[in-house]
Image (cartoon, rainbow, N blue to C red):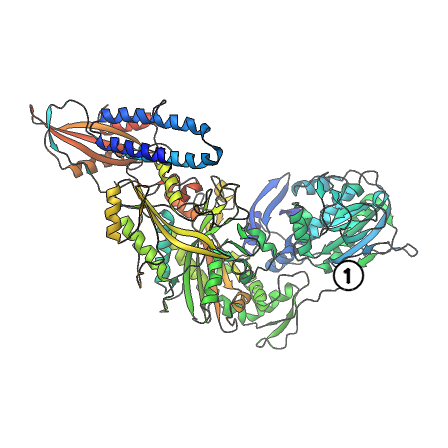
Amino acid sequence: MNQNLEAIKNQYIDKIAALKTDKELESLRIELFGRNGLINNLFSKIKDIAPQEKKQYGADLNQLKTKLETSLLSKNVQKSEKLTSEKLTSTIFGLPKIGHLHPITQTERQLNEVFRKLGFSVYNSPEIVADEFNFTRLNVPKDHPARDMQDSIYIKEPDYLLRTQTSAIESYLLFQKNKDLPLRAAFPGSVFRNEKVNRSNHFVFHQYQAVVVDKNVTIKDLIGTMDLMFKTLYGQEVVVRYRSKYYPEVAPGVGPDMQCFNCHGVGCPLCKYAGWIEMGGSGMIHPKVLEMASIDPNIWSGFAFGMGLDRWTMAQKNIKDIRTLMGGNLAYRPNEL
Amino acid sequence: MKIILSELKKFLPELKVESTKLRDDLTMIGHFTNFFEEIENETVFDLDIKVNRGDCLGYYGLARDLSVFYNIDLKLPFSREVRPQDGVGFLPIEIKTDKVTRVMAIKLSGLKNSKSPKWLQDFLKYHGSKSINTIVDLTNYIMFLYGIPNHAFDTAKSTDNLIWEINSKFKEFTSLDGSKLTLNNEILMINNPNKALSLSFWGGESCSIDLTTTETIIELAIYDRTTVRQNSRQLKSVTEASVRLEKDLDPELIPQAFNHLINLILENCDGQITSQLFDHYPNKITPPQIEFDPQKPSLVSGIEIPVNFSIDCLTRLGCQSDIQHLTSDILITPPSIRKDISIEADLIEEVIRFWGYYKIPTNEPLDFKNLPDITPPEIYLIESLKDQLIDLGYDEILSWPLVTTPTNQKTVITTENSINSEAIYLRQSLIPSLTQQLDQYTRFKLPEPQFFEIGKVFSKEGNKYIEKNSLALYNVDQNKLISDLQQLKLEGKIINDNFFEIIIDNLPKPKKYIPQLIKNNAVELNSQIITLDANLTLDTKEDSIKLIEKYSKIIGSEFLWKLIITDIYQDSKNSQYKYTFQASYFNLDDKKAKNLHLKSFNLL
């Protein structure tokens, strides 16, 4: 931090520590944050700072402002009203502050628990991936139209990108564990797409995927296991239909749709009047995907399914703006009153 | 894609299902149908066609699927084969590139072009296309019916000397809608020796058909789809034609669509054929032969699907087979229109989707299987740390991995196409994100913030991309932060008084850890938290926590952030007890918070 600002910070931290009454606190607050207060004065001087130092100075000033604001906010001082009675205790009574898990973590743990009970491990892989693992090994060669389904954020086009789907973790899993068959693994993960960020879209999504490779795996196993997952998340009454759907990494592909929880299948703006909401994708792992991982599709088969967690989590917590999930307005009441 | 029911019924005269059922059936067999709507006595369906089903970007392909599903006949529209009269000349067309899979072309003369008939105008309107004139509209009509784009050139402007080539001489192209595009040397085009006439997927203004057109060359073509896709992306232009030509289309369908189009133009605009038929199809595509085990649909689905159904289904789809015994493998040749069928798994998928996924039970999940645990130890470490932190009262946040300012310019990873021009760097530390979060909490006047994030931080060493797991903490109370770090056995430097960050990859990891299952609140704040005091006088001394619980219940959890008792006094005169409550409210404006406060503490 800029030396002058550092000195100001230290000076006022000491002043805040020495405050005794709410009147003193209010007076200092005005001195710092009033219209003609110190902080506004410092901001007004930014124009006089050399251009190359402006950015750093602004950041330091913001940091100073935040520090002093939070210190003032958290300062407990004596009320200045005249007391005609005897104070019984100086303790502040309240329920203890508890910590909170992010709603996405809560959902991920709930699902991990379902799959642990079926013998699944939890897995992960890097977020920067080679094109090979995000696309090619998932049966999406270069210039395949399926690549248009996902706008990528490239680190080095066309070789390295931020993973666009948790299927990239599946590629790593099959590649790394192709000698450890059979296997069962589930993987929550962040994925990234080149999307404009607004109230309903984000460039970071959270997906959950599960993969099984074994002998004689069937679509019945896939649908039964997916249904168990949906019932765990949405309750026993949830109505899910399973239909034909295309994903290059699976064949046959299966698409689960949940009956719209808003209109119960009648049709409404939320479900675009279809009565159903698409819940993700799944299917039997494509023989080419197994082959590319050096797994013999004549001996081994498997299924994979994935779904997004953000929309569900938002509905659960009554969050209207997807940006809330990634910082900003998300907060937790300090205790469950 | 839009589909009009009456037009679909021309291919499927026996189709007699309710629109709602047709919508659901289309979806179940893989053509997700968003909705249907009644417009001027027509029923129009809105479908999402799968990227591997280029054949279904036309009525014909979709009708083929439905004829199998409903087991009804598929009727092809009657079209006389195009037969030029003897003595007409050959078109001087040149194909100078191998990117043309097949092109059929012919010249028509003596045409009387006009405004389109109403049925054609309506058809295009329901498909979201503008009516231009009869000849142009019929070319679009055929594209929508068969999914194969085509084009009409006004020979008075284009001449007969059409050349299919990769562009090497033209710098600019003006499309039919007047858009000016800058060309490079990789664009597949139709030119004449002097003029750029058309892109593979978009006609040009320089040879457009208008009401004065009397002579035209009509062409239907399929190209190397990768080239079309690349051209479309390079020129940032997507058209109905480019969407189709990027898919694997069937060159064997061209004659059917071509004959239909030529017949329609001659019927509606008079005229006659004045050239020989041009048909360039140098490498006839041979459909694959696939070994198919008729037992496999049952084995893969997990339910019994009769072998006879499988064979019947594939036959109705147009597959050729050499059935000897139903118990042994059969050699299947899929129809050329089904480019998505290339291996046995694709045939199995066809059988299962027509048998119906809804027949597969949903209540038989996998049984437990005892397999070696392959969970990476760092996942156990992360889960364990999260549980320890929330036990200490910290809240978890997640933040953007893209940041505007690098922490270390030398090792920062820069994205090539970020979501905006500012947040282009991958974060190297979680502290900036936590600082931003703190700013936001301060704006909301959130009392006593203490929170953490565990996430990836990124850096570059030479050409190597490095990802590490980092933990960062903030606590408004520095003393508590220090004691919490001691309890967590985390060593490091406190940053800016109240922050701490550590790379956790090298910390000791638990061999196994089963995390707590927690369902806690989370709130989307949309205004400042408002804190108000309330003084209550009670005759007897009460348990403070019970009082807090009592008034929390009265206020209700919808808007109450926090309730504490800050002071308790005993009045020396009358022995009454005075309690000072401090209640914080969220997502309420000042007035509403005050009303709720006064009402709850009976202070009105």
Which chain contains the residue that carries disc 1? B
- Measured along the vertical axis of the image, is residue A174 above or below residue B138? below
Tell how many labels: 1
User: In which quadrant of the rendered image does the C terminus of chain A lie?
Assistant: top left
CA neighbours of label 1 inside 10 A, class few (<14), some (14 to 19), many (20+): some
Q: Which residue corresponds to the image point at 35% horizontal and 28% vertical from the top-left?
A: B589
Residue B48, image x, y percentages: 58, 50
Q: Which residue is mark 1?
A: B281
User: Which residue is more in the foreground, B496 or B287?
Assistant: B496
Residue extending furthest toward the right: B87
Q: Is residue B553 left or right of residue A229?
A: left
The quarter of the image holding the N terminus of chain A is: top left
Residue toward you, A9 or B311: A9
Q: Position of residue A322 (x, y in %)?
A: 44, 42
Q: Is residue B572 left or right of residue B29?
A: left
Residue B237: give x, y in percent of width and height: 66, 45
Q: Is residue A16 visible?
A: yes
Please tell me whether mark 1 sits on a helix, a strand or a loop.
loop
Amino acid, disc 1:
Tyr
